[in-house]
Image (cartoon, coloured by chain):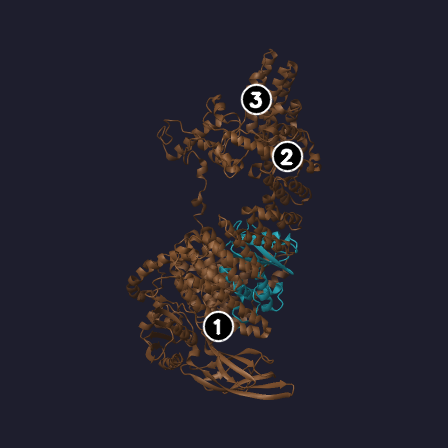
Amino acid sequence: MALKMVKGSIDRMFDKNLQDLVRGIRNHKEDEAKYISQCIDEIKQELKQDNIAVKANAVCKLTYLQMLGYDISWAAFNIIEVMSASKFTFKRIGYLAASQCFHEGTDVIMLTTNQIRKDLSSPSQYDTGVALTGLSCFVTPDLARDLANDIMTLMSHTKPYIRKKAVLIMYKVFLKYPESLRPAFPRLKEKLEDPDPGVQSAAVNVICELARRNPKNYLSLAPLFFKLMTSSTNNWVLIKIIKLFGALTPLEPRLGKKLIEPLTNLIHSTSAMSLLYECVNTVIAVLISLSSGMPNHSASIQLCVQKLRILIEDSDQNLKYLGLLAMSKILRTHPKSVQAHKDLVLQCLDDKDESIRLRALDLLYGMVSKKNLVEIVKKLMSHVDKAEGTTYRDELLTKIIDICSQCNYQHVTNFQWYISVLVELTRLEGTRHGHLIAAQMLDVAIRVRAIRKFAVSQMSALLDSTHLVASSTQRSGICEVLYAAAWICGEFSEHLQEPHQTLEAMLRPKVTTLPGHIQAVYVQNVVKLYASILQQKEQAAEPEAAQDVTQLMVDRLPQFVQSADLEVQERASCILQLVKHIQKLQAKDVPVAEEVSALFAGELNPVAPKAQKKVPVPEGLDLDAWINEPPSDSESEDEKPKGIFHEEEQRHAKQQLPEADEEELARRREARKQEQANNPFYIKSSPSPQKRYQDMPGVEHIPVVQIDLSVPLKVPGMPMSDQYVKLEEERRHRQRLEKDRKKKKKKDKEKKGKPRHHGSLHTESDEDITPAQQVDIVTEEMPENALPSDEDDKDPNDPYRALDIDLDKPLADSEKLPVQKHRNVDNSKSADKEDVPVVEKKIKKPKKKEKKHREKEREEKGKEKEGEDLDFWLSTTPLPAAAPALPSPLPAEEGEEPRREEQGDEEEDDDSERDPEKKSSKRKKKKHKKEKEERSKDKKKSKKKKPPSDKAAEPVENGALDEEPLPPMSSYCLLAENSYIRMTYDIQGSLQKDSQVTVSVVLENQSCSFLKNMELNVLDSLNTKLARPEGSSVHDGVPVPFQLPPGISNEAQFVFTIQSIVMAQKLKGTLSFIAKNDEGSTHEKLDFKLHFSCTSYLVTTPCYSDAFAKLLESGDLSMSSIKVDGISMSFQNLLAKICFHHHFSVVERVDSCASMYSRSIQGHHVCLLMKKGEKSVSIDGKCSDSTLLSNLLEELKATLAKC
Amino acid sequence: MIQAILVFNNHGKPRLVRFYQRFPEEIQQQIVRETFHLVLKRDDNICNFLEGGSLIGGPDYKLIYRHYATLYFVFCVDSSESELGILDLIQVFVETLDKCFENVCELDLIFHMDKGGLSAAPARAVSAVKNINLPEIPRNINIGDLNIKVPNLSQFV
C-alpha cells in the first residue's frame, strides 16, 4: 500500500499539471487542437489511476479545457470521484468541474445525492460551502427534492457564511422544485431579519427575485421590506428592495404613496449614484402607477427630472446613458417635464457614443410638437447624412418615421414637407427600411386627400428615376419604395401631369429586374394609368393618340408575361388579352374609355380598424349553426371563417390580396389597427356614409369611413430644397393654418353633434366609426381575439410560472419537505449540532397535530389579519378619507420611525468625526449594539402591527416586548479608573469559536497628558488565557494599537481563550502606559479585575417555539429556579433588560410570562421561563449543564435585584 | 440575476467563463465570441452597457463590462440588477483577484484557475442569485495546502 502511494506520487511528478497544460497550449499555437487531443488522451490515462491526487489534477485540467470549448461530459463519473475526495482541495476541484459541466441531462448526477448530503452536513464550513456553490449550478428537480430539507436546515446554520449560501441556493431549489417554496418560505422570511448583514442581503435577494416574477404573492411582505428600507444602510440591499418596490407599486397604488417620501429622502441624502438612480427609477414607477394626481406629485417629478439632468450632464458616459434611459420612462407619462430638457437631449444626439445617441433618439420621440417637428427632423436628417454604419442610420430612419407618424401625424402640419422628407430618405443607400418608407407614402397619400396631387408628382419623379433606384442590386431594400410610387401613380392617375411619360417609365425593360411583388403592382397600375390616358385622349378626341398608347401597351406587356413570378405573369397575360381586345375595338372606332375606366371606378376608402368586427349579423343568420355537418373539426374551422372573409375580400379586392390567409389577415389588421387607431383624418366626411353606400349594393353594412382632410394645405409646387431654407416663414404660416384647422375642426364636431371627450382625438375617432349595432362575434370571426391575451402571455414553460404560489395560506400537513428516512442522523446529535434544533418530521407530527387545532384558528385569524394588516399599513399615509376610520396605534409607530433614523444618523456622524483608525473598530462595535437594539425594536414593531386590539390574549412568538420606550441600555461596565484613564469593557462570544471570547475595552483618556505605549496584561488562569501575539511569552502584555490624546477615547479588542465556560472567572490584570505632558513623561499603571460572567459566554440566538418545545421535551436538560421579590419595574422592561444584558431572545410571551432561549459559545442550550407576580419575579431555567445554569441564575438574580 | 460572467483577453481568448444557466459547450464558445466582437468594437471612453439582446435570453438582458489592461470582464445580467451596482461589483471582483494574486494579471487567472474559481465564488454567489456583501467573505481561508488571504475591501458606495 505504502509502496503504491510512493509509486503514485512518483508518477505524478511526471504528469502535466494545469500550468504545464496552459504553457503547452501556448507553445503549440499552430497545432493547438492536436496538442489538446493528445493531452486529453493523457488525461484519460491519468483518470484510470487509483491515486486521487492524479485524478484531481486530471479533472482540473479538464475544467480548463471545458472553458476552451471541449466537451468533458465523458469524465462525469471521474468528476464525482474527485468530488467525494476527503481533501478539500480535491473536493473543490471536483465541484468546480461539476458546476461547469453537469446539467439536467447528465445521467450520473443522481449518484451525487448522498455525497452532496454528506458534504452539506460536514463539520467543515468550507466543505459545506463548496457543496452549496457547486450545487447551485447543477441542481436538478430530483436533487432539489432530495436535498431541499438539508439545505433548509443549513439556513439556520451557526455560521453566516453557510447561512448565506444556503439562502441563496434555496432560490435554485424553488425553481426546480416549486413545492418546496411554501414550506421553506417562513424560514426565508425570517432570514430577512438575520443578525448577519450578508445573510440578510441574501434573503432580500432571493425574495426580490421571487417577487419580481410573481409580485402579487409578495405584496404582504411590503411592510417588512419597507421597514428594511428605512433601516438598512447596506446599499446592495437597498437597491434590491427599491427595485422590488418598483415591481410592487403597479399592483398597489397606496404603496406608492407611502413610498414617495422615504424615497425622496433617500434621493436627497445618498451619495451613491447607483442608489440614487434606482430611487429615481422607483419614484418614476410610483408616479406612473398613481393615476390621480397627488399634492406634491409634480414636485417629485421635478426632483427626478432634475437629478436625471445631473446624471445626463455628467461626463461619465455610463451615468449619461442611464439618465437618458430613465428619462424615457418619465416621458411616457409626463412628457411635459421632459420636454423642458430638449436642449440636453439634442446635445446627446451629437454624442460620440452610439448607445447614447440611440437613447437620445428614443427620447426625441416624445419631445416633438407641431412647432419643433420640422426643426428636429431637419437635425435628424443631417445626422442621417453623417452617420456611419447602416445600423445607426436605419435606426435614425425608423425614428424619423416614428416621430412624424406618431398619433396619426398629430404633429405634421405640412404634408408636402413630409412627403419630401420621405422622398429624400429614399436616397439612402443600403437601408433595410424601404418598406417602411413605402408604407408611409401609401398611408399619407390615401388618407390625406389634399396631398395626392403633390404626392403623385413626387412619385412619378421617383418612377422616372427608376434606373437610379434599381441600378445597384444592393439596394434591394429601397426599391420597396417603387411599390408605393407605382401604386400611388396608378390609383391617383387623374392628378398626373404627364401620364404618358409615367406610363413609359413604368413599362421600361429595367422594371423586370425588380422583385416580383413590385412588378405585379406595376402591371396592375399600368392599366389604371392606361385607362385614364384613354379617357383623356377620347375626351380630347384624339383617337390616334389613344391607339398609340394601346400599341405601346401591346408592345411592352409581353416582357411581363415572360416573368418568372407567377403573380406578374398571370396579371400580365390577363391584361395583355384585355388590351388586345381594346385594340380591336379601337380599330373599329368604338369608344372604349368609359368601359375601361369602369374597371377601376369608385373611390378607395380606408377601412376602420374595427369595421369588420362591427359588421352586423343579418337577421336570421345564425353564425354558430352548421351549414353542413362538418366531417371533422379541423376542416370546418378552416372553412367557416374563410367564407366570411372571402366575401369581405371581394368587396375590397383592391385593398387586400385575396391570397392572404387568415393569420396574415389578422396580423395585418392588427398592424393597421395600430396605425389607424385614433386617426383624426379617419373621420367620415362624405355627406353621410349610409347614403353613400346605398348607391353601391352589397356594401351597405360595412361602415367604411372616408377621409376628409380638413386642413387646407399649402400651395403645391414649392421646391423641396427651398423648404428648409424657408423654415421660419413656413412656421409662421403653419401657425396660421393651425388656427384655421382648429376652427374648422370645431365646426366639424359641432356639425356632427358629437360630444367632446377631453378633446382627445382618440376617443373621438373611435366613436365616430362605431356603428350603432354592437356585434360580438367571437374567435373564429375575429382573428384579433385569437392573439395572445394576458393569460397566454406567460410561456407555459416559463420556470417562474410554477412559483406563482400563494404564500399566505397556512401550510397543510402534506406540504412538508421530504425528509430523508434512511441513514438518519440520531436526533440528539443533530439537535446538538444545529443551531436551531431541527425537528425531525416523524417525531414532530403528533405534537404538531395537537398544536394545529390551537393554531388553526389563530392562523385563520392571523391570515385575515394579515390582509387587513397590509391595508392598515398601507393606509397610514395621510389619506384624508380613510384616516378617521382607522384605529389609533399609528401615531406611536410613525413617531418612532424618524427617531430611530435620527439615532442612526447621530451615530454615523459621531463616527465620522473621529479618526479613521478608531472608526473601524468602533463602528463594528456600534453596529453590533445598534443591531441588537434595533432587533428588539423591530420585533416590537412587527408585533405591534399585527393585532391592534386583542393582543393581550394572544401568545406572541419570537417577538420581544412592548410599547413603552426602553430605557437606554449599555452592556459596557466599568473595569477600572484612575486620574489618567477610565476603562470600560464588554465581552462577546461568537458561535463560530467555541473557546474564544472577545473583550472590547474602551479606554478613555481623562487627563491632559498624552497617553502612549499602552500595554494590557493579565495573569492567565489555567482556564482562561489572553491570546498573545505569536512568539511572546505568557508574561508579556499585549500592546494597545493606538495612542490617546487628551480627552479622547478608543476601543481595543482582546481575544481570550477559554476551556470551560460553566463558571464565572475573574482575571487580574494591569494596564501600563506612558503619560506624557509638558512636564515630561511618567510610567503609569492601572490594575483591574476582568470579570468573565457566565452570561458573557452566551450568544443571542433566535429559536422557534416548536423547536424550543422539542428541546424541553427531550429531557436532557437539568433544571433550576430562582425567585426575586420586590420588583416594581414593568414586565416589558424587565424582559428587555434580561434579553439585552444576558443575551437571550424571547421565544414566546403571554401576558407577563415569557420563555427565552440562548446558547453558549460551546453549544449549551439555555432555556428560561420568567413569570412576574404581584411584586416578584420567578425564573425557571433549563440547561444542558447544571453548573452553568446555577451560575447564570445567580447572575440573573443580581441583575433583577437591581431593578 | 447574473446569467454569466465572462473574462477574456484582448484577443477573445476565454480566461474565466462561468455560466449560471446551462448552455452546451459550442454555444458557450459562440456566446464568448459574439460578446467579444461586440465589446471589441467599443471605445474605452464610451458607456459600459450593451443591450446584447439575442445572446443570452432576450431583451431583458444587458451586457455590462469593464476593460482592464488586457482583460475584458463581462457580466450578463437581467433587469433585476442595478447597472451601476454591477459595475461596482466588477471593480470589487477585480480588486479581490488583485489581492488574492498580488497584482493580478491575465496569466494568474489561468495559472490559478482553481483559485480563480473560488474567488469567483462571491460572484458566483451572485449568480446563484445574488448580490454579495463583500465584507462578509470569509477572511484568510486556510485549509490544507491552500492559503488565500482575502483582503479587506472598502464598503461599496
Residue A940 in picture, x, y percent from top left: 41, 66
Q: Which mark is residue A736?
A: 2
- Tell me which label, 2 or 3, sits earlier in the chain: 3
Quarter of the image for residue A949 reads bottom left
> Mark 3: which amino acid?
Ile
Chain B, hue in figure: cyan
Q: How far from the left and from the top, in percent, is residue A947? A: 36, 61
Quadrant location of residue A1045? bottom right
Would you name the residue on which mark 3 appears?
A575
Mark yes or no: residue A443 visible: no
The amino acid marked with disc number 1 is Lys
Residue named by callout 1? A929
Q: Secondary structure at mark 3?
A: helix
On the same chain, marks 2 and 3? The answer is: yes
Tell me if mark 2 has few (under 14), some (14-19) or many (20+) residues whose alpha carbon lies within 10 angstroms of its own. few
Q: Determine the chain carrying the residue at label 1.
A: A
Q: Which chain is brown?
A: A
Residue type of the residue flagged with mark 2: Arg
Q: Is residue A1162 above or below residue A233?
A: below
Marks 2,1: beta carbons within 8 A = no
Q: Residues within 10 Å of mark 1 (few under 14, many from 20)?
A: some
| Label pair 1/3, CB-CB below 8 angstroms | no
* Marks 1, 3: nearer the viewer: 1
Sequence order check, earlier mark of 1 and 3: 3
- Label 1 vs label 3: CA separation? 93 Å
